[in-house]
Image: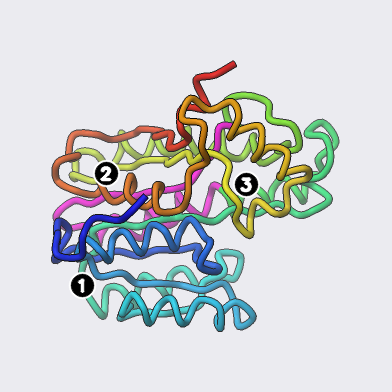
C-alpha cells in the first residue's frame, strides 16, 4: 500500500525513536518511513558496526537527527540513547521497539527442552528490553505519548517452528497490558502490533518460513501478504491524537489471518 502524501503532516512536531532497523525490509523501517512521511522527526539506532552500513543510508533518508548504536544486550547503550534523545529534543512522543532474539539452539528446539540460559536470553532481548525502554521513555513523554512493540500470532496459538519465541511474545503482550494500565494516567499509550508473516531478516531464522508465508497468503481472508508499509501506516495511526483513547491493544495487521482456523 502507499503511505499518505508527504504533505499530509498529521504528526508534524512529533519526535520519536525507532529501534530495530536492520535493512530496507525491516518492519521498523516501514514504521520509520510512515512516521517521517507524516511529518514526525525520527531518531534511529543500529545494532553494531556490521549493521551500520546497511542502516546509515536509511537514517539519512529519514534526516534522522540522532543515529546511534544500540545493542540492548550491551550494558549502558540503551541509557546512552535516551540520554541523547533528552539532550537533542528534551522530550519524546513515541518509541517503536522492533527487536527480538533467541539463540539458534534455543529457538530451534522444543520448548520443553529449552536451556535456562537460552530462555533468559530470549526473554531479556525480546521482552524485558521493551519494559526497560518504557521506563526510560516515561520521563521524556511530558505531554503523553505512545510506545509500540512488535508481536506475532504465535503468542496466542501454537505455530510450528515458532517455539520459545511464542512464549516470549506472550509475555511481551502481557507486558503491554500492564504498562498501558500503569502509564495511562500520564497520557502514555502502549500497543503491540501483530503483523502477519512477512519476509524480514529476523524471520529468516525460523525453519520452513517460506511454507508459512504461502499458507498465510492462501488462508488469510484478504488473500495477500502484508508488507512493511501496511504495518507502518497502522502504527503511525495509533500515534495520532485520533487514537488517544486506544491503548493496551494487540493490533493485528495480517489480512485477517488470525481469525481463520
Question: Residue 160: x, y in percent?
Answer: 74, 32
Q: Is residue 130 magenta?
A: yes
| Residues packed near mark 2 inside 10 Å, few (<14), some (14 to 19) or many (20 plus) | many
Colouring scheme applied when the structure was drawn: rainbow
The residue to which callout 2 is attached is: 238
Q: Is residue 91 magenta?
A: no
Give the label, 3 or 2, closer to the camera.
Answer: 2
| Residues packed near mark 3 inside 10 Å, few (<14), some (14 to 19) or many (20 plus) | many
Q: Secondary structure under badge 1?
A: loop
Residues tagged 3 and 1 counted as in contact (Cβ below 8 A): no
Magenta-highlighted residues:
127-153
Give the label, 1 or 2, closer to the camera.
Answer: 2
Q: Which picture quadrant has residue 159?
A: top right
Above or below, 243 relative to 121: above
Which residue appears farthest toward the top when viewing the image? 261
Q: Earlier in the sequence, mark 3 or mark 2?
A: 3
Q: Residue at x 64, y 34 (%)?
A: 167
The residue to which callout 3 is attached is: 123
Question: Residue 87: x, y in percent?
Answer: 26, 79
Q: Which mark is residue 90?
A: 1
Mark 3–mark 2 Cα distance, whole angstroms, equals 26 Å
Q: Which mark is residue 23?
A: none
Q: Secondary structure under badge 3?
A: helix
Amino acid at each position: 500500500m502507499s503511505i499518505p502524501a508527504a504533505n499530509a503532516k498529521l504528526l508534524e512536531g512529533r519526535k520519536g525513536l525507532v529501534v530495530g532497523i536492520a535493512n530496507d525490509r525491516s518492519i521498523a523501517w516501514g514504521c520509520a518511513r510512515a512516521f517521517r512521511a507524516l511529518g514526525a522527526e525520527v531518531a534511529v539506532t543500529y545494532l553494531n558496526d556490521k549493521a551500520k552500513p546497511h542502516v546509515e543510508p536509511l537514517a539519512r533518508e529519514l534526516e534522522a537527527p540522532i543515529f546511534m548504536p544500540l545493542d540492548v544486550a550491551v550494558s549502558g547503550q540503551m541509557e546512552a540513547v535516551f540520554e541523547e534523545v533528552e539532550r537533542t529534543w528534551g522530550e519524546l512522543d513515541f518509541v517503536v521497539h522492533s527487536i527480538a532474539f533467541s539463540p539458534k539452539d534455543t529457538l530451534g528446539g522444543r520448548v520443553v527442552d529449552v536451556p535456562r540460559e537460552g530462555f533468559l536470553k530470549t526473554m531479556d532481548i525480546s521482552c524485558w528490553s521493551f519494559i526497560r525502554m518504557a521506563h526510560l521513555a516515561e520521563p521524556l513523554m511530558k505531554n503523553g505519548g505512545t510506545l509500540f512493540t512488535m508481536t506475532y500470532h504465535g503468542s496466542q496459538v501454537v505455530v510450528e517452528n515458532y517455539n520459545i519465541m511464542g512464549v516470549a511474545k506472550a509475555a511481551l503482550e502481557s507486558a503491554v497490558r500492564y504498562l498501558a494500565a500503569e502509564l495511562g494516567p500520564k497520557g502514555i499509550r502502549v500497543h503491540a502490533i501483530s503483523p502477519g508473516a512477512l519476509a524480514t531478516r529476523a524471520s529468516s531464522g525460523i525453519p520452513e518460513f517460506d511454507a508459512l508465508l504461502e499458507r498465510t497468503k492462501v488462508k488469510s481472508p484478504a488473500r495477500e501478504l502484508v508488507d512493511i508499509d501496511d504495518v507502518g501506516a497502522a502504527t503511525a495511526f495509533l500515534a495520532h491524537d485520533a487514537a488517544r483513547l486506544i491503548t493496551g491493544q494487540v493490533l493485528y495487521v495480517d489480512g485477517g489471518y488470525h481469525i481463520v482456523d
